[in-house]
């Protein structure tokens, strides 16, 4: 298939599942504004990996069994999470400081342990460094299976937990009235992020797994406002990044898997940032331009109605292109009609804003919206009667 | 231990470690109070692509292009984080996560793609640094400290680190009042006419200078740990900013000295012949100090 080896396919599947799970878990972390917890979680795995290796060697094993190493990673990462939580709850330090402290200290201690491993059995530690940046080169088939299975399990957990996680990330107070404990759901969310991190260690590495938990979520948020849709889309983006990255990196020798996966996700993020409707940069620029155009058009028409000359070059250009004025600046017939309409609209607004019981509608005055798009024909007629003279009734 | 052994082999790394720890811990105090503690983390990640780019552009593994590259990457990262945050309306933590992981991934890819195998440039080195190798072979004992001939051959990192520390300390000393006011009450600072935004940016840039210089000497692990742990521990000791900065300097120095000694001599005391990573041990000690402060510090509770 595609000329890819069995192992590559297995790794690509595993990375895809992992990316899916990471996207979903990361979306909830992001919606709860706790994206950087993943940074503490991932760096805190290192001492666990090293201790697990030492323990397995002490027990007479080879020390490289992936399941054992990942168990160690999960345990020390759990300890790191608990410390972040404790520091945040019981001291005056903020969550960011707690995260930074745990990630740097655990990572530093992990490095100390790695040098210990280097000194006690030179050569045998080969492979532990690969947890820093991930590596799929020369991965054992059994390891690939562990990762694929782990990714599938994490994904299954996402599916099971999606309702409570959506509810809590959308509205924690409401979730609490529904019998859900936001603290517990948060904990489940963290556990999920931890599971994703541990599974991803071998492929993406502990420094970059953070990216897989953050990038897809942030990218997905550009496209939709609904929590559940953000999670789904983030899962999709994560999954695509994972498998595409794994396949891409297998095509050439110097393309390390972890960075490629991250860069694919980063490319999707960039596209989302630029092109997403309403929240994207391009949409923002277009909205800005159209707003500017409407303001100039309106002010130009009002100036025509009052018989003022228009000096602003952009306004002149705009009116001329719309066929509202002639080249010499005099209003065309269509221009006179449009100007009269604008002036009438402005007068209607003026009267409307003087009415105390029209406050809800008056609040929407922005100098651009025609009043007849907000009121019914009857209301407009009443407004016009009131405008006609003091004797009119509303 | 005799001076003949201590002065050439252990004194320079200890001094460099202390200078680096101080240079990071001092601005760390303000970053911590401004809830920007993780800026140090972000900066130290983007240093890698910076040095790789510096190397690729000049083709030389010399210090200045790499440090300039690192500084450029740090400034670029800060700008990009701001941009993504503003333009995309993304919360600061996630914006930071987006930028530093992407840039780090780019750095690793660049490193793998380019032929750097012949030179000493790798990710591990970037992370752990190489504090132990900063030795002063021309020293023969304590007397060398007054011998201008030998002093010329001090490791160059020492001079750079001292300059970086001086820059950081001067910045904080000169701008102490505006920094303190804008850190605690931004609105009030604005009404006083303090350029709050520019000052915040300047603080981050000074932190980046410290990070880049320290990274060159000791690796990014110490950088991240020293930005956060000593100031955080100091914050649990006092309510006064000046006292906090003082405590953080004490804790940073203690971490560097104790960490280096434990890494170099600890294993010997336990009967192992080889030392362990000094950078890792310094980070570990700073964490232990923070742990002690979190358990017993007089101002540990939230009020």
Image: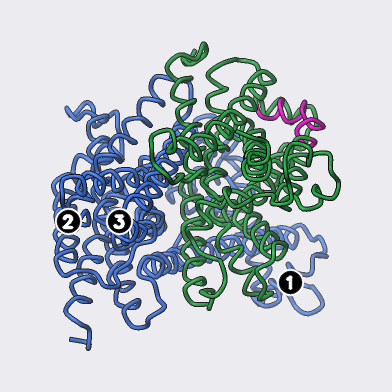
Chain colours: A blue, B green
| Place of residue B189 in the rendered image (x, y in percent of width and height, measured from the top left) | 73, 28
* Segment colored magenta: B170-183
Number of other residues with Cα within 10 Å of mark 2, as a class: few under 14, some 14 to 19, many 20 or more: many
Q: Work out whether residue B251 or residue B102 is closer to the camera in this orientation and state it.
A: B251
- From where the camera sits, is residue A172 visible? yes
Residue at numbered disc 1: A331
Marks 1 and 2 belong to one chain: yes
Quarter of the figure with residue B226: top right
Q: Work out whether residue A291 or residue B280 is closer to the camera in this orientation and state it.
A: B280
Q: CA distance from mark 1 to mark 3?
A: 70 Å
Is residue A337 shown in magenta?
no
Residue at numbered disc 3: A201
Mark earlier in primary sequence (1, 3): 3
Query: Magenta-highlighted stretch: main secondary structure?
Result: helix
Is residue B161 depicted above or below B61 in this figure? above
Number of other residues with Cα within 10 Å of mark 3, as a class: few under 14, some 14 to 19, many 20 or more: many
Residue at image location 73% in from the left, 67% down from the top: A315
């Amino acid at each position: 298939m595609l000329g890819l080896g069995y192992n590559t396919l297995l790794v690509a599947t595993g990375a895809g599942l992992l990316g899916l799970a990471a996207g979903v878990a990361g979306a909830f972390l992001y919606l709860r504004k706790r994206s950087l917890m993943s940074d503490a979680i991932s760096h805190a795995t290192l001492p666990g990996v090293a201790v697990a290796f030492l323990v397995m060697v002490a027990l007479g094993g080879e020390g490289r069994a992936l399941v054992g190493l990942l168990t160690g990673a999960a345990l020390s990462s759990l300890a790191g999470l608990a410390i972040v939580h404790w520091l945040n709850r019981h001291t005056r330090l903020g969550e960011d400081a707690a995260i930074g402290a745990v990630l740097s200290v655990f990572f530093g201690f992990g490095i100390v342990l790695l040098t210990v491993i280097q000194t006690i059995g030179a050569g045998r530690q080969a492979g532990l460094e690969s947890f820093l940046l991930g590596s799929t080169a020369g991965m054992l088939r059994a390891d690939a299976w562990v990762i694929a299975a782990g990714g599938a399990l994490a994904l299954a957990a996402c599916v099971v937990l999606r309702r409570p996680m959506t509810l809590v990330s959308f509205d924690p107070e409401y979730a609490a009235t529904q019998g859900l404990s936001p603290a517990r759901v948060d904990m489940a969310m963290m556990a999920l992020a931890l599971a994703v991190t541990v599974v991803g260690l071998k492929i993406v590495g502990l420094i970059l797994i953070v990216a897989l938990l953050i990038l897809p979520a942030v990218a997905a948020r550009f496209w939709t406002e609904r929590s559940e849709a953000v999670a789904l889309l983030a899962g999709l983006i994560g999954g695509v990044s994972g498998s595409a990255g794994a396949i891409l990196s297998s095509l050439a020798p110097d393309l390390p898997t972890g960075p490629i996966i991250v860069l694919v996700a980063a490319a999707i993020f960039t596209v989302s940032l630029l092109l997403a409707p309403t929240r994207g940069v391009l949409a923002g620029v277009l909205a800005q331009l159209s707003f500017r155009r409407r303001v100039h058009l309106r002010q130009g028409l009002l100036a025509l109605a009052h018989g003022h000359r228009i000096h602003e070059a952009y306004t002149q250009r705009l009116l001329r292109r719309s066929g509202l004025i002639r080249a010499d600046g005099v209003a065309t017939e269509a221009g006179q009609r449009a100007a009269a309409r604008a002036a009438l609209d402005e007068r209607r607004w003026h009267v409307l804003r003087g009415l105390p019981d029209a406050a809800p509608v008056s609040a929407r005055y922005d100098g651009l919206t025609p009043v007849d798009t907000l009121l019914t024909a009857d209301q407009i007629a009443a407004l016009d009667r009131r405008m006609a003279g003091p004797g009119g009734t509303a | 231990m005799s001076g003949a052994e201590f002065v050439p082999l252990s004194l320079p790394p200890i001094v460099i470690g202390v200078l680096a720890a101080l240079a990071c811990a001092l601005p760390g105090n303000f970053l911590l109070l401004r809830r920007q503690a993780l800026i140090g983390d972000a900066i130290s990640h983007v240093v890698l692509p910076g040095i790789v780019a510096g190397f690729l552009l000049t083709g030389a593994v010399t210090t200045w292009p790499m440090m300039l590259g690192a500084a450029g990457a740090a400034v670029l990262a800060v700008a990009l984080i701001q941009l993504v945050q503003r333009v995309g309306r993304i919360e600061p933590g996630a914006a930071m996560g987006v930028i530093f992981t992407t840039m780090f991934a780019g750095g690793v890819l660049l490193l793998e793609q380019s032929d750097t195998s012949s030179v000493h440039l790798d990710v591990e080195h970037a992370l752990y640094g190489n504090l132990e190798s900063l030795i002063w072979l021309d020293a023969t004992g304590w007397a060398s400290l007054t011998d201008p001939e030998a002093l010329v051959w001090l490791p160059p990192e020492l001079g750079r680190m001292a300059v970086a520390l001086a820059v950081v300390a001067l910045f904080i000393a000169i701008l102490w009042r505006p920094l303190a006011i804008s850190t605690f009450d931004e609105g009030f600072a604005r009404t006083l006419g303090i350029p709050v935004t520019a000052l915040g940016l300047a603080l981050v840039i000074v932190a980046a200078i410290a990070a880049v210089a320290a990274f060159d000497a000791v690796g990014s692990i110490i950088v991240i740990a020293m930005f956060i742990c000593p100031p955080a521990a100091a914050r649990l000791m006092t309510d006064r900013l000046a006292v906090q900065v003082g405590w953080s300097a004490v804790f940073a120095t203690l971490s560097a000295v104790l960490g280096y000694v434990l890494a170099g001599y600890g294993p010997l005391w336990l009967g192992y012949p080889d030392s362990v990573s000094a950078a890792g041990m310094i980070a570990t000690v700073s964490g232990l100090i923070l742990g002690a402060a979190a358990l017993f510090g007089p101002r540990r509770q939230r009020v």
